[in-house]
Image (cartoon, rainbow, N blue to C red):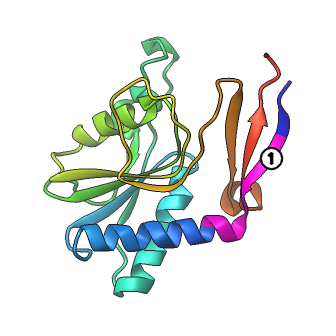
Amino acid sequence: MARFKRQIMDDDGIRRALTRIAHEIVERNKGTEDIVIVGIKSRGAPLANRLADRIEEIEGIKPPVGLLDITPYRDDLQEEDKPGSRKDAALIPFGVTDKCVILVDDVLYTGRSVRAAMEALMDRGRPQLIQLAVLIDRGHRELPIRPDFVGKNVPTSSSESIAVCLHETDEKDEVLIIEDGSS
């Protein structure tokens, strides 16, 4: 049984991290030209919308926002266990070809979700550049994937997990470390 260990970010911490990431995105890309933001379902989507809002506050222009459901691209499911089809995996109302795609997720762990998301993006076009923004980087990579923008680095043990709670899905904003009960 999992149990609460400690809170590592509250609503103010999440807000500050997203504001900093938005500034870093604008600075690194010298503005917002050709930037689109794509959130990985489920908690990457509200984070993507929040980042777009912050960028609009900074630059006066809101980048387009899309959503990816990476389930059909996961490498840990058999084909018959994957719901939906690859063609239905994205709610991206814009083209990604020649765009700078900011891919957004809540937690970066092994890198497998990001690999699946990049494959899903490539099925929709050829971005000029893909940059990765994550709220939490907890380490333990299995693939050579590195975030470009990080809200907070949180080294964890294999017996711990990170729970990101967002107002849009969980009615409050906080990030928790959870101790897995299997150890």
Identify the residue at the far bottom of this view: 60
Three-letter amino acid code of the residue under disc 1: Arg
> Left of 29 or right of it: where is 128?
left
Q: Mark 1 Cα within 10 Å, few/some/many (few <14, many 20+)?
A: few
Q: Position of residue 89 (x, y in %)?
A: 40, 39
Taking the magenta stretch, the answer to whether it contains residue 89 is no
Front in this rendered view, residue 127 or 68: 127
114 to the left or right of 9: left
Q: Is residue 90 left or right of residue 178?
A: left
> Which of 30 and 127 lies nearest the eye of the viewer?
30
Look at the image and say whether residue 13 sits in the magenta stretch: yes
Query: Based on the displayed image, in which of its 4 quarters is residue 13 positioned?
Result: bottom right
Residue 52 locus on image (x, y percent) = 43, 71
Q: What is the quadrant of the N terminus in the image?
A: top right
Q: Is 151 left, or right, of 161 in this rendering?
A: left
Q: Is residue 50 visible?
A: no
Dividing the picture into quadrants, the one containing residue 85 is: top left
The relative height of residue 116 versus residue 92 in the rendered view (above or below) is above
Residue found 38% across the figure and 47% down from its top: 147
Does residue 96 appear anywhere in the picture? yes
Choose between 18 and 82: the one closer to the eye: 18
Range of magenta residues: 5-14
User: In which quadrant will I find the C terminus?
Assistant: top right
Q: Residue 82 in the image: state x and y as whole percent.
A: 48, 22
Measured from the top left, where is residue 167 in percent x and y? 71, 62
Q: Which residue corresponds to the image point at 56% horizontal and 46% vertical from the top-left?
A: 42
Residue occupying the point 63% across, 34% down? 156
Q: How many marks?
A: 1
* Residue ID for mark 1: 6
| Element type at mark 1 | strand
